[in-house]
Image: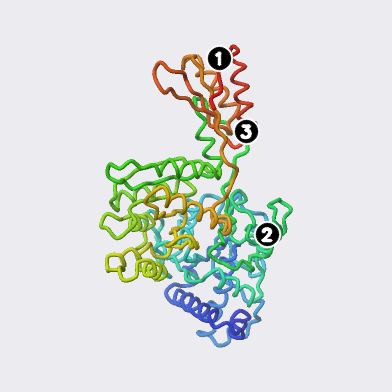
Amino acid sequence: MEIDRAIKECDDKRLKTKYNNAIYVIQRALALYSVEEVALSFNGGKDSTVLLHLLRAGYYLHMAGKNQSFGNHGDGETTLPIRTIYFESPTVFPEINSFTYETASIFRLQMDIVRSDFKSGLEALLKAKPIRAFFLGVRIGDPTAVGQEQFSPSSPGWPPFMRVNPILDWSYRDVWEFLLTCKVSYCSLYDQGYTSIGSIHNTVPNALLSLSKSTSSEDKFKPAYMLSDGRLERAGRAKSFISQPSSAAVKGFKNEDYFMKSMFTASVIALRFGTVEDPMRSILSRKLHSIGWAVSHVAVIRNDIDSVADEVERQKSMTDMVFIYGGFGPLPSDVTAAGVAKAFGVRMALEKEFEECLQNLIGEKCTVERNEMAKLPEGITELLHHENLSLPLIKCQNVIILNATNVKELEQEWDCLIELMRSCGYLQMTGPFVSKRLATMLSDVEIAEPLSEICMEFPDLVIGGYRESRSGPVVVTFKGKDKARSSAAIAALRKKFHHGAFSEID
């Protein structure tokens, strides 16, 4: 069998070990379930392609062990009689679609195509043709990998089946070593700089593979297998921008819903510092605005694990990035890391690299209590090192834990974070916000309807208003990325009233 032969003839001991472990998982599954009771989830991506060829090899070796004559069949003609499920989406790349159908034809896959959403499609599929186990191409670090093992039952609320994850412990490098060593075909997008492929709306080539300094659509990119740091494979996943207003245009005074959907959003979570006034929230919000991010939520919470977990779990699914500070240290009230771990459903485990940083920082003072600080969320933690930081920042998927306890430390951590983000592509940088303000002695009632019309005409701006006192003027604010758009909105508003009704505030 060509896959098995290619691995045995290669010199990569690590790849051989990964391959043998994956084959063991596959053969174990085929011993537990009949061929009719298992299925392969295939989506045309690199991990899925690796899984397909591992399954081909595993099935071949499984059958050859039961029947010696089975090995007499030609390698290229070996049919994989395992049911294959393809969840086809209207937002999938055409190249992914083409590769999936071509692969199914070459290897004679018995492919069921599901065009509804994943859960309802799966429920209908399993109702018609029951399946007891699914082979999945999930790897540690994937958003869906948290809490999974090589054999994991389906989650509560889903149809009952066993998830079989043969490549759960494979790295980005392992995936590409396998594909290149075995010389198997993969989707052409990976040769165009795409390193992790989602939908056409949220995936771009990885900027770290760009061959030029610009970011134009005509850029040339190195192939995906040349990405040196596999931890950055998802750096090409970008948030989609809405270019046109939806049919349900905003009819009220503000246009924030549309605005928030059309750009990168962040939430800021602070653990309560007793009665001490905390200026760090507003400073961090301004810092985020300076790189073009909208702060959609700011929360001050109690310093207990459940409060942290509840807030982080809610915000990590609603915003692109969560920044949390306070509650990180050796005291019993320092529960930020434990709360983040609970939000992701993982346990706390000793992080050796972080422990070494602590020992270098505090030396003999590194007591048992302080060693507890080296316990971080397992499997999702990435340390962000910078030469100007005594301790690295902590990144758990889209949650960043800041160590700062005062404004000076926050300023330093932010500068280092921005430098790291620019070099590694973690945080998408966009143009800063531009804000303008007008003051008027007109009443709220007089300006409400015209302002509502301006909101509909300029959906890319956030337009709001407030009074500093009951007898004072109404202050109208315009916030957006384009100064000319803000000026145009102001001009449009002024045309609706008599000359001098509004004055601009510096």
Which of disc 3 and disc 2 is earlier in sequence? 2
Q: Is residue 333 left or right of residue 41?
A: left
Of residue 103 and residue 438, the one placed in the foreground of this image is 438
> Residue at label 1?
501
Q: Residues within 10 Å of mark 2 (few under 14, many from 20)?
A: some
The N terminus, quarter of image:
bottom right
Circle 1: element type: loop
Q: Is residue 246 left or right of residue 356?
A: right
User: How far is the residue under mark 1 from the one under mark 3?
Assistant: 22 Å
Give percent across and percent down for residue 76: 66, 77
The structure residue drawn at horizontal position 49% and vertical position 69%, both measured from the top left corner, is 36
**Amino acid bearing label 2:** Ser
The structure residue drawn at horizontal position 42% and vertical position 61%, both measured from the top left corner, is 146
User: How far is the residue under mark 2 from the one under mark 3?
Assistant: 30 Å
Q: Is residue 73 visible?
A: yes
As drawn, 134 above or below 77: above
Which of disc 3 and disc 1 is earlier in sequence? 3
Of residue 248 and residue 262, the one placed in the foreground of this image is 262
- Tell me whether the residue at label 2 lies in contact with that at label 1, contact meaning CB atoms closer than 8 angstroms: no
Marking on residue 210: 2
**Amino acid bearing label 1:** Ala
The C terminus, quarter of image:
top right
Give percent across and percent down for residue 448: 50, 19
> Residue at label 3?
483
As drawn, 166 above or below 279: below
Circle 2: element type: loop
Which of disc 1 and disc 2 is earlier in sequence? 2
Q: How is the image coloured?
A: rainbow
Give percent across and percent down for residue 153: 39, 64
Give percent across and percent down for residue 404: 40, 53
Q: Residues within 10 Å of mark 1 (few under 14, many from 20)?
A: some
